[in-house]
Every structure is written in C-alpha cells, then in structure tokens.
Image (cartoon, rainbow, N blue to C red):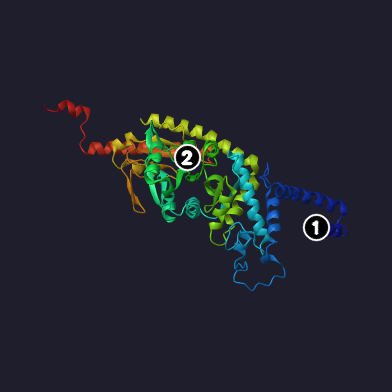
Amino acid sequence: MNNENFTLSEKIVSPSYVRQGLQARRGHEQRIRALLEQGKCPEEGWSESTIELFLNELAVLDSNNFLGNCGVGEREGRVASSLVARRHYRLIHGIGRSGDIAAVQPKAAGSSLLNKITNSVVLDVLKCAGVRSVSSCFVVPMATGMSLTLCFLTLRHRRPAARYILWPRIDQKSCFKSMITAGFEPVVIENIIEGDELRTDLEAVEKKIEELGAENVLCVHSTTSCFAPRVPDRLEELAVMCAKYNIPHIVNNAYGVQSSKCMHLIQQGARVGRIDAFVQSLDKNFMVPVGGAIIAGFDDEFIKEISKMYPGRASASPSLDVLITLLTLGASGYKKLLSERKELYTHLAQELKALAERHGERLLHTPHNPISLAMSLDGLQSSCDKAVTQLGSMLFTRQVSGARVIPLGMKQTVSGHTFHGFMSHSDAYPCPYLNAASAIGITKNDVELSIKRLDKCLKALKKEGNIEKSELGTPSEGSDEQTVP
C-alpha cells in the first residue's frame, strides 16, 4: 500500500481509521529504512510482521514474482510446490551469479539485496562480538569444513608452489579433510600437555616452517573453539610467526563467535601479526539450520577473492535464515544469549565438578577453554574395560545429546593419516574423559537434567562393574583373611 492507495482507502473506510493504519505501517517502514541506511543489526528485535513485510517486499523485486513475467530461459525461478515457495518466501533465485557469489543478479534485485544486507548485518555482529577491526565478510552456503577448503583453494593462486598446511592437531575429521579436499598435504603438529590442557607447540611449528621452507607452506591452519582438554591455539604467537615468515594464516573459528575470549584472540592476532581469514559456522553460533558459514577477514581484496572462487550461484537459505534470526533477536537479544551462555558455563563447571568429586573423579583444569569442559573417567575405566564407551551409549539413549566420551587408545585413519589417541587431540593423553559444553542456547534445565542423568549412569555402571568383579572371583577382604600363605 502506497500513499495513493491509502488516500483511495479513505473513500471506503473512515479516514481516521485509515490514517491510524498508515501510522502503524510507517512504524514498520521506519525500521526497514534504518536497516537499509545503516546496514547494521537493529538494537531491538523486530516483530514477525515487520520481518515478513520486509521479505515480501524483497520477493516482489525478483522476476519470478513479476505479474507479467514470461520466462524462456533454463533457470526462471520456477517452483513446483507452493509449500516450497512459501518456505523460501518466494525468494527462489538464490544469491550471486555464475562467476561470483557476491555479484548482483539482474533479474533478482530482491534476492541480491537480501544477500548484501545479510553480509552487512553479519559483519556488524562480528564486530559487536569482539573482532572490531574485521573489514569484510560474506555468508557462504557451505558448512565450516568446505568453507575452509574454499579459503585454501584461493590461497593456491597466491602461492602456487606451496603444498603443505601446518595444522596444530585437533581431532575433528572435517578440519583435516578440508585440507585434503583442497589438494594439500596437512602437516600435523602434535600438541603439548601443560597441566591438564593440550596447547600449541609453537617451537614445533617454527621448526617445521624452517624444515619445509616458508615458500612451500600454503598457510598455518589454527583453531579457536574446540573440545577440552584441547584449548584454543596460541593465536597471537602464531600470527606473529606467520607475519615473520610471510605465511598466510587461516583460523577455524567454528563456534567461537559466541565466546568473547575466542573473538579477542582473533582481534589480538590480527593486531600484532597476521590473520588472513577466519571461518565460523552459522548453526553453531546463531542457532539456525546446518549448512552455512561466515568467511571473514581484515583485507577486503582477499575476502573478495575467496567469494569469487565459489563456482556458480548459491542457495540463499543460509543467508535468509541468519538474517531472520538476527532481525528477530536484535543486537541486544543476541548479546543476552551470549551473556547467558557464559553464566551457564560457570554453572555447568560447578555442577560437573561436584558430580566428579562424588564419583571419585575430577573436573580437568582447562581455564583457557571458554566453552567446553572435561571430567576424568579414571575410576570408571578401572571398574570395567568397556564402561567408558558404554557410558556414551547410555547417555545417548537417555536423551543426553552432545556429551562426548573419550576412551584411551583409540586409533582412526582419516584420508590416509593414522591418528593415535583419536578424539583426544593427543597421541597419549593420560586419562579417559567426558566432554560437556556450554554453547549458545543452553538452558539451566539442560545443565541440571544432564547432570542428574549422568549421575544415574555412573552409579549404574559402577554397580555393574562391581558385580562383574565378584563374578570373576575377585577376592574380598574376608577371603583374603582365609588365604593360606
């Protein structure tokens, strides 16, 4: 409804009522105008009606929604199911063009605008979350692993002679396979144990650079967010080292946006040394469906190069999902979620520590990991060989999702490389353990229910272990006294 239509409406319905409706609509339009002018996440969240009005206005700018459109091409935004069309708000053309994911589509002005606005809003959120000097970013419809691959493939054009990627070990297959898929040889740098923590071996990284030759190293591939007792890499020191040897530095920040500590590491690394790009997952940081990531950095030209490396157009779904989410929450709503997550991390740590002590275990001391916690399972291991892996199964069947149980001595071959002590980020971590994380969206009820169920599982397993020992004829104190010397 434009002003002319509102004027005509006054001939049908009382003018005072129409003017009241016009005022209400202007309230929606003012929010939309502020978004288009500033390109920032609104401080307060929008109502669903404002968001839907905005998306519908964008959709009518795409050619597939033109009333008189006559398409004779091979890709005209046709959708067989009206349910699918509604699911995507009739924004069917996706984002980008065949040679550039950031390019504007002539016949999809609305979808192109969606793409530009989303990238701008996400950039604002990254700055608010702690990386103040980030200059450019874009949403890509791939998860973290493939997004890292895209970064490595872009670096190939800058460093055609390089074949190695130096990678402080983190036991997640997607990280490792992202380098293999890009056609490079990962050089695994084992972590060193400091107390309970697994930390970056800076000396080993520098030694490997000198051994291989800096010109043969594509980049250093570091990590922030990870499972305890692994902690974020020493990003500042690595960034300084990369600057010293003129080696690119790519950071896997998969679920680090939700942690001010992880974001501070990236900000400081870029300030004192070199970080070329950092990659983060949409679903892990913004509570949207799996399938999207943000590639961000401090050099506009390099980030633009990465976006141009993406072949073809792309799905707009991840961009649409994260934009709707951020408009719903607003900056204040997102900051509130981050604050609640941090508070519940402390609560989870306290509850897990108390539980560990009740069962003769301990909460591993990992102060440099701001998201993940680990509890030893030494006693459980000693009671029964299979008890540790059985605990993982029991928790899953009791609807405790996300808890990871790490036994000793696991071996796994990934793309031809054998990892000893797989899942523990170390060849020989000294004890089995259980992981739990305080990630964005967690609730106090999640913490308390999971602790209660874990407690029951541990009690049941210890009881089973004691029964097994007695059935195997393990001597009791009484039988010891009757033993003939």
Q: Is residue 393 visible?
A: no
User: How many numbered callouts?
Assistant: 2
Residue indicated by mark 1: 2
Q: Secondary structure at mark 2?
A: helix
Give the vertical position of 75 relative to 296 (above or below).
Answer: below
Image position of 94 (left or right of 454)? right
Give the quarter of the image for residue 41: top right
Callout 1: 10 Å neighbours few (<14), some, many (20+)? Answer: few
Q: Earlier in the sequence, mark 1 or mark 2?
A: 1
Q: Which mark is residue 244?
A: 2
Residue at disc 1, secondary structure: loop
Q: CA distance from mark 1 to mark 2?
A: 60 Å
What percent of the width, then of the height, locates residue 475?
A: 20, 32
**Residue most toward the bottom?**
72
Who is closer to the viewer here, 366 or 472?
366
Q: Nearer the viewer, mark 1 or mark 2?
A: 2
Q: Residues within 10 Å of mark 2 (few under 14, many from 20)?
A: few
Q: Quadrant of the C terminus?
A: top left
Residue 147: x, y in percent?
A: 50, 52
What type is the residue that disc 2 sits on? Answer: Lys
Position in image of residue 444 (x %, y %):
53, 36
**Amino acid type of disc 1?**
Asn
Q: Position of residue 233 (x, y in %)?
A: 45, 38
Is residue 240 in sight in this rendering? yes
